[in-house]
Amino acid sequence: MKKENIISGIKKASVVATAVVTLGSCGQKRAQDNDAQAAIYKTDSAANVMPEYKNAMNAVDLYEAQIQTYKNANKNMLKVYAKDYIRKIIKPGQLQKLLLAGMEEQIFMEVTCLDADESLYKSADLDSCYVTKVRFFRRNQRWYNDLVMYLLDNYNEKQLLKSDFFKIVNNKEMKNTFEYNSKQIEDLQSVAKIASERKNTIYEDLWHQYSEGKQRKR
């Protein structure tokens, strides 16, 4: 009986010890989470009043807005020239209408994808035979496929310049303007990357400062 009491006591002590360790771990985890939240709050607060950080953040926003302006200019210009070309080579009809619409409405852009789901063109109230024609056109007229890929941001400027588009829709003024805009985009992306890296570095330095300060206090 005495032996059983001793064994029972050992088991109870083990359970209590395990519970203490578990509770200690949970408490430590909560403390660490609270410290992390406090460090984030202090880092954000410090960054938002730091002139260099604010300047870098504003620079990134400005460069990205300028990049988008040039991209939009490229897309709008290409659509104008591509529409003129389609009107010349495709007889007026449903296919011409669909190809022209494919440069304007997102639903039509998706329909022109080779792997377009049947539900997409049904929701757009399009006859499957016309969708088949568009798919055939896109497979055999790569320039149109290249254009749509660029409009959907699946191609960048360099990829489009290497594609068939400018060989088929052959217009020197259009290509020169596109190349100029693309060069501006490339330059802006370069400086935007530098500004973004500087912004991230400043934030990381502040984060280390406040997070390590919390660890030292513990």
Image (cartoon, rainbow, N blue to C red):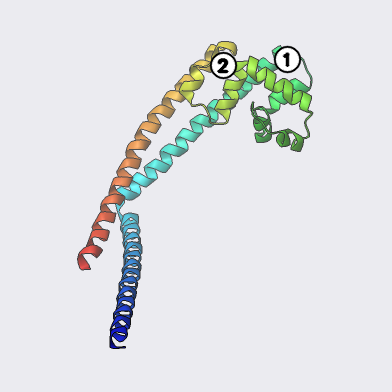
- Front in this rendered view, residue 136 or 103: 136
- Is 54 rendered above or below residue 179? below
The image quarter in which residue 121 lies: top right
Q: Is residue 189 left or right of residue 155?
A: left
Number of other residues with Cα within 10 Å of mark 1, as a class: few under 14, some 14 to 19, many 20 or more: few
Q: Is residue 127 left or right of residue 167?
A: right
The residue at the point 48 percent across, 16 percent down is 162
The image quarter in which residue 113 lies: top right
- Front in this rendered view, residue 216 or 94: 216
Name the residue tied to disc 1: 90
Location of residue 156 in the rendering, given as x and y in whole percent from the top left corner: 48, 26
Q: Amino acid at mark 2?
A: Phe
Q: Is residue 23 left or right of residue 81?
A: left
Label 1 with label 2: CB-CB less than 8 Å: no
Q: Amino acid at mark 1?
A: Ile
Location of residue 81 in the rendering, given as x and y in whole percent from the top left corner: 62, 19
Location of residue 159 in the rendering, given as x and y in whole percent from the top left corner: 48, 21
Name the residue tied to disc 2: 165
**The residue tagged with tag 1: helix, strand or loop?**
loop
* Label drawn at residue 131: none
The residue at the point 32 percent across, 73 percent down is 18
